[in-house]
Image (spheres, rainbow, N blue to C red):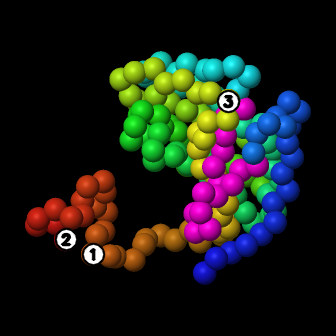
């Protein structure tokens, strides 16, 4: 099932040359975000930087935007989004910016208009906490990181 909603977007001054965020195909979940850097930004290995997109959005109540890495950048250059997915809340009205980190072995240069991330718009579930004394038992129980999928594990 596809959920559809309208999202207001504003182009910030000086960014008339950049395309609106768009999906590569009709079934793509994410909208490509482009770099709105004034000049090339060199990202050395092991470093991170904040890249502007040139746009601000107004999400409707009940939605969030998740900023996710582009798999091609990760595979080819080791360029990641360290806090992925980054969350844009419905009440934020500032410029969308993307934290990029370089886990590769060579410097990576971000050019104006480069596709740097994907933006996925998602409904938000708001939970009401129900504090209890104990939780129900499950086959996994308290098994944590790496506890499933091992021979001999429950």
Find the residue positioned furthest to the bottom.
1
Q: Given this view, does label 3 or label 1 mark the residue nearer the observer?
A: 3
**Tag 1 near tag 2, CB within 8 Å:** yes
> Taking 96 as reference, is 59 above or below it?
below
> Taking 92 as reference, is 137 above or below it?
below
Residue 53 in percent (x, y) is at 72, 37
Mark positioned earlier in the residue sequence (1 or 2):
1
| Residue 80 as seen in the image, left or right of residue 96 | left
> Taking 112 as reference, is 44 above or below it?
above
Q: Nearer the viewer, residue 127 or 129?
A: 127
Q: Is residue 87 visible?
A: no
Q: Residue at x 24, y 59 (%)?
A: 147
Q: Given this view, does label 2 or label 3 mark the residue nearer the observer?
A: 3
Q: Report the Cα–Cα distance between label 1 and label 2.
A: 6 Å
Image quadrant holding the C terminus, namely bottom left
- Quadrant location of residue 55? top right
Residue matched to label 3: 112
Q: Which residues are magenta?
A: 20-36
Q: Report the Cα–Cα distance between label 2 and label 3.
A: 51 Å
Q: Secondary structure at mark 1?
A: loop
| Residue 62 as seen in the image, left or right of residue 150 | right
Residue matched to label 2: 154
Residue 129 in percent (x, y) is at 61, 67
Q: Main secondary structure of the magenta part?
A: loop
Return the mark for residue 139.
Answer: 1
Q: Residue at x 58, y 27 (%)?
A: 110
Residue 19 in percent (x, y) is at 75, 45
């Amino acid at each position: 099932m596809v959920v559809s909603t309208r999202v207001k977007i504003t182009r910030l001054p000086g960014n008339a040359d950049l395309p609106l965020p768009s999906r590569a195909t009709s079934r793509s979940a994410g909208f490509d975000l482009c770099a709105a850097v004034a000049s090339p930004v060199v990202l050395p290995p092991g470093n991170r930087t904040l890249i502007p997109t040139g746009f601000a959005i107004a999400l409707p109540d009940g939605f969030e935007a998740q900023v996710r890495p582009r798999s091609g950048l990760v595979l080819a250059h080791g360029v990641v989004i360290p806090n992925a997915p980054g969350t844009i809340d419905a009440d934020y009205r500032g410029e969308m910016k993307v934290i990029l980190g370089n886990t590769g072995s060579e410097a990576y240069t971000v050019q104006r208009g480069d596709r740097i991330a994907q933006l996925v718009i998602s409904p938000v579930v708001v939970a009401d906490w129900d504090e209890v004394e104990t939780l129900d038992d499950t086959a996994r129980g308290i098994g944590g990181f790496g506890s499933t999928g091992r021979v001999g594990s429950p």
